[in-house]
Image (cartoon, helix red, strand yellow):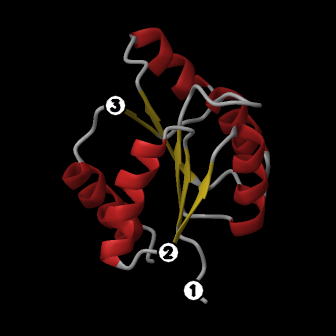
Amino acid sequence: MEPVKILIADDEPYIVRSLSYIFQREGIPYDVAKDGEEALQKARLHKPKIFFLDIMMPKKSGFEVCAQIKQDPKLHSIHIIMLTAKGQEEDKQKSLSVGADEYITKPFSPRHVLSRVKELLSSLGV
């Protein structure tokens, strides 16, 4: 089995379905976490290249998950993209301050997300 390249952490089924569909169609291995604690466990297990992380999730917020991943020497190189309905500038600044690499607001363009993922995977030599 090919290693997971992308981890999606979101508690909204529509978002998970949308992202899952585009990655599955492109043959990009991914996994899904539905809350912050599961997201941390799966990040440690799979060490994905790219991590789509929602801010508002049960058990741990995306901010907490992001900070913990970026503080872990084994995980800090994971490219974290905050994917959230919170479009306020302070949310974006807080995301970046805890270590997020990018910030995308919902609703998003699946085409844009896919082209960004392909660009990132290519630049990471994957």
Residue wearing tag 2:
29
Please identify the quarter of the rendering in which residue 19 is found.
Answer: bottom left
Q: Tell which circle, 3 or 1, labels the residue nearer the N-terminal end.
A: 1
- Secondary structure of the residue carrying tag 2 is loop
- Kind of residue at disc 3: Lys
Q: Name the foreground residue: 57 vs 101.
A: 57
Identify which residue is drawn at 27% across, 38% down: 108
Residue extending furthest toward the front: 13
Residue 21: image location, x then y, percent: 35, 63
- Mark 3 vs mark 1, CA separation in Å: 29 Å
Residue 107: name its quadrant: top left
Residue 101 location in percent, x, y?
Answer: 49, 40
Left or right relative to 78: residue 116: left
Distance from the alpha carbon under mark 2 to that under mark 3: 23 Å
What crowding class fits label 1: few (fewer than 14 Cα within 10 Å), some (14-19), or many (20 or more)?
few
Q: Which residue is mark 1?
A: 2
Work out whether residue 71 or residue 88 is closer to the camera in this orientation and state it: 88
The mark that comes first in sequence, 2 or 3, is 2
Residue 13 percent coordinates (x, y): 48, 44
The type of residue carrying mark 1 is Glu
Identify the disc placed on residue 47. none
Mark 2 or 1, nearer chain start: 1
Identify whether 5 is placed above or below 52: below
Q: Secondary structure at mark 3?
A: loop
The residue that label 3 is drawn on is 106
Q: Amino acid at mark 2?
A: Pro
Nearer to me, 84 or 66:
84
- Asked if the residue at tag 1 contacts the one at tag 2, i.e. Cβ–Cβ closer than 8 Å, the answer is yes
